[in-house]
Image: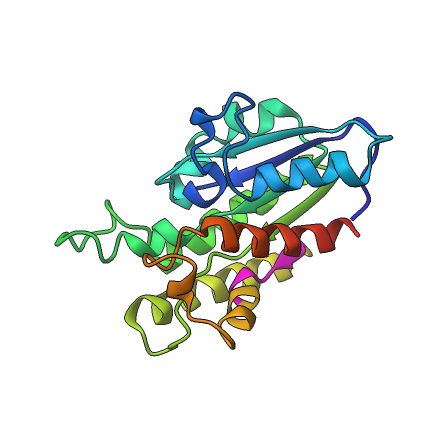
């Protein structure tokens, strides 16, 4: 991935991206987007980039598509990263309701990712990132379902030739040595350690 001076770099997603952005003056949040912005300034001080956090907590892929034109396309991104899907999975477990008006099925998720890939073509550089869970037991009910969504994302992005950062793999490598609960008990929100893991994986794309 090649960055150019003056690029607008947009990160679209859910709470992992949002990371309390409305509580920070620069609207970059306290997560990986903030780290990437700081790294770009520190390591490429001769360039100026516009970094935008387009994450919103609680968003599913359905929600992101609904606000795409105003929150992503309107920014005219040169470089675009998108990570969405954990809430699509989580909605299966956070209520007694078992209908697709509430949660996003794997089938709908696949179609939503297809639409995102089509819309993402507006950017010169476009990269998807898989959702993840910091649970190394693959028989865990949530992880087992999440893997179906990740497989759907990889299937669609392969069709479109869109690069994907496998964030589940990044956390699996960490969990060879430490429990995911070491990062955060909810196994999803990355905290200080997890945001470094996310930022490192993204920085590799820049390099």
Closer to the camera in the image, 34 or 82: 34
Expressed as whole percent of the image width and height from the top left, the position of residue 14 reads 43, 42
Say which residue appears at 73% left-offset and 55% top-offset: 204
Residue farthest left in this picture: 96
**In this view, 169 is above or below 98:** below
Closer to the camera in the image, 200 or 50: 200
Expressed as whole percent of the image width and height from the top left, the position of residue 191 reads 45, 49
Expressed as whole percent of the image width and height from the top left, the position of residue 129 reads 57, 53
Q: Quadrant of residue 160?
A: bottom right
Closer to the camera in the image, 24 or 152: 24
**In this view, 206 is above or below 173:** above
Residue farthest right in this picture: 46
Horizontally, is 7 left or right of 197 in the view? Answer: right
Segment colored magenta: 162-168
Horizontally, is 103 left or right of 112 in the view? Answer: left
Q: In the rendered structure, does residue 166 fall within the stretch colored magenta?
A: yes
Say which residue appears at 29% left-offset and 71% top-offset: 141
How many numbered circles does the render carry? 0
Q: Quadrant of residue 147?
A: bottom left
Q: In the rendered structure, does residue 57 fall within the stretch colored magenta?
A: no
Say which residue appears at 66% left-offset and 35% top-offset: 37
Q: How is the image coloured?
A: rainbow
Expressed as whole percent of the image width and height from the top left, the position of residue 105 reads 33, 56
């Amino acid at each position: 991935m090649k960055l150019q001076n003056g690029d607008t770099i947009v990160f679209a997603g859910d709470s992992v991206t949002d990371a309390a952005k409305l509580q920070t003056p620069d609207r970059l949040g306290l997560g990986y987007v903030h780290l990437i912005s700081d790294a770009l300034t520190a390591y490429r001080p001769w360039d100026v980039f516009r970094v935008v956090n387009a994450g919103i907590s609680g968003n599913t892929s359905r929600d992101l598509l609904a606000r795409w034109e105003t929150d992503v396309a309107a920014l005219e991104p040169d470089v675009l990263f998108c990570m969405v899907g954990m809430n699509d999975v989580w909605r299966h477990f956070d209520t007694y309701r078992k209908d697709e008006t509430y949660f996003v099925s794997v089938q709908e998720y696949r179609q939503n990712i297809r639409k995102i890939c089509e819309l993402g073509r507006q950017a010169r550089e476009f990269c998807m990132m898989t959702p993840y869970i910091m649970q190394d037991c693959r028989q865990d009910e949530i992880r087992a379902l999440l893997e179906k969504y990740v497989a759907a994302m990889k299937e669609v992005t392969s069709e479109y030739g869109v690069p994907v950062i496998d964030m589940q793999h990044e956390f699996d490598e960490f969990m060879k040595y430490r429990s995911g609960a070491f990062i955060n008990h909810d196994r999803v929100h990355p905290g200080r350690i997890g945001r470094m893991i996310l930022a490192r994986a993204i920085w590799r794309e820049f390099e």
